[in-house]
Amino acid sequence: MRNHSPLLALALLLAILEAPLATHAVGENKLEVFSWWTSGGEAAALDALFNVYKKQSPGVEIVNATVAGGGGSTARPVLQTRLAGGNPPDSWQTHPGWELLGQYVEPGYCEPITELYKSDGWDTAFPKELVVNLMTKDRKIYAVLAGIHRGNVLWYNTKLLEKNGIKVGNKMTIEEFFAACDKLKAAGIPALGVGDSGIWASAQLFENTLLGVIGPKGWADLFSGAMQWDDPKVKEAMKQFAKMQDYVNPDHSALSWDQAIKALMEGKVAFSSMGDWADGEFLKANMKERQDFGWMSHPGTDGAFIIVADGFTLANGAPHKEAALAWLKSVGSKEAQEAFNPLKGSIPARTDVDRSKFDGYHQWSMDSFANDKLVASCVHGEAAPAAFQQALNDGVTSFIVDKNVDNFANALVQAAKESQSKK
Ligand code: GAL
């Protein structure tokens, strides 16, 4: 400072004095959105959502706070720390059901957005059962859905199956599936692509397999406590899941879910049981429906739709509340739903969108959502409290190694008891 002129010193001093004001002014025009959408397809879809918002709210600077890791396995703990520390993002990605209501609404981290349902006609535009059953507490609504994924989809590499003389229709029994796996195994190909560096991807394979055995009615019973986790049917699903391990790619624990989908695209594995965010990856890679990749319900789950819905919240004490409200309005708008979902693989949560804007997969999923039995995902935080979701992940981690059905079943019986007692 010694060599500076008095004028410059004054300018610097003024700059320092003005700095907090300037930060505040910029702060007013920001919006921080927290999510785990970082894979190719996820990031492209999020960008589409941001672009609609930017058009509707020009001049707002978007802080895209993402934490990589599919299923939010890394993002959710980071978010919890921020919320507990009183440092919330304005809005964050959440699954409805237990995750939204138990983890965020119950401790007081969310502000209701019930008003938007009235002002923006959402009362009639969104499926009532979902809003009422999974997003409402004490008659207040706490999130808006951007889209609805189907969790129980079996994807396949069309050319690889053809090359190996495997014909598939639009559904498969578990026996047919294992027969195809055997054929591929004999040809030296890992039939089933898994990327469970975040264990949830294997937990999801189990969840899908479980639904295939117990069906939607069994699902309702299991999560209401009318069926136990050591029921013979649940154990049968565990046995099937154990058998699947014989056909999984050996590097599964080193891969993320999207790397496993990439392996499918490259013909290194034939099938992958994954939620339809996988469709976003196929689209991003310019893969052609039916020609390059195909899909059907996970074996035995035809007629049922595992909901994995993505919503956004309004933080209690959102640093930029006005921008956040505009963001939520935007997410719920027809324009945003039509821009986001074709890229994400999910179907719009709004029921009044233009179907012609969607490709074959989306039309299939829309029909399934309209006609099939809907069940909530446990792996994605909807059907059970976080502690149970964690216990399921832990159980799957051990089971993949020891394949001990009794241990797995007993651990889940115990975890269900514990979460039941906390309800
Ligand atoms: C789910 C989420 C999807 C997708 C997937 C993989 O939990 O609902 O939108 O992002 O994880 O990351």
Image (cartoon, grey):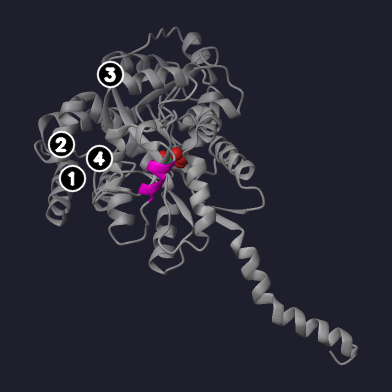
Which residue in the structure is indicated by mark 4?
133
Prevailing SS of the magenta stretch = helix
Of residues 48 and 132, the one nearer the viewer is 132
Q: Amino acid at mark 3?
A: Gly
Give whichever of discs 2 and 1 has the lower sequence position: 2
4 and 2 marks in contact (CB < 8 Å): no
**Amino acid beneath label 1:** Leu
Residue 412, which numbered label? Answer: 1
The answer to whether the residue labelled 4 contacts the one labelled 1, judged by CB atoms less than 8 Å apart, is no
Check if mark 4's residue and mark 3's residue have beta carbons within 8 Å: no
- The answer to whether residue 67 of the structure is visible from this angle is no
- The disc label shown at residue 303, or none: 3
Which kind of residue does numbered mark 4 sit on? Answer: Asn
Q: Earlier in the sequence, mark 2 or mark 3?
A: 2
Magenta region includes residue 115: yes
Q: Residue furthest left?
A: 226
SS at mark 3 in the image: loop
Instruction: Estimate how packed mark 1 is, as few (under 14), some (14 to 19) or many (20 or more) residues with alpha carbons within 10 Å.
Output: many
For the magenta stretch, what is the residue range?
Answer: 113-119
Q: Is mark 2 within 8 Å of ligand 1?
A: no
Helix or strand or loop: what does disc 1 sit on?
helix
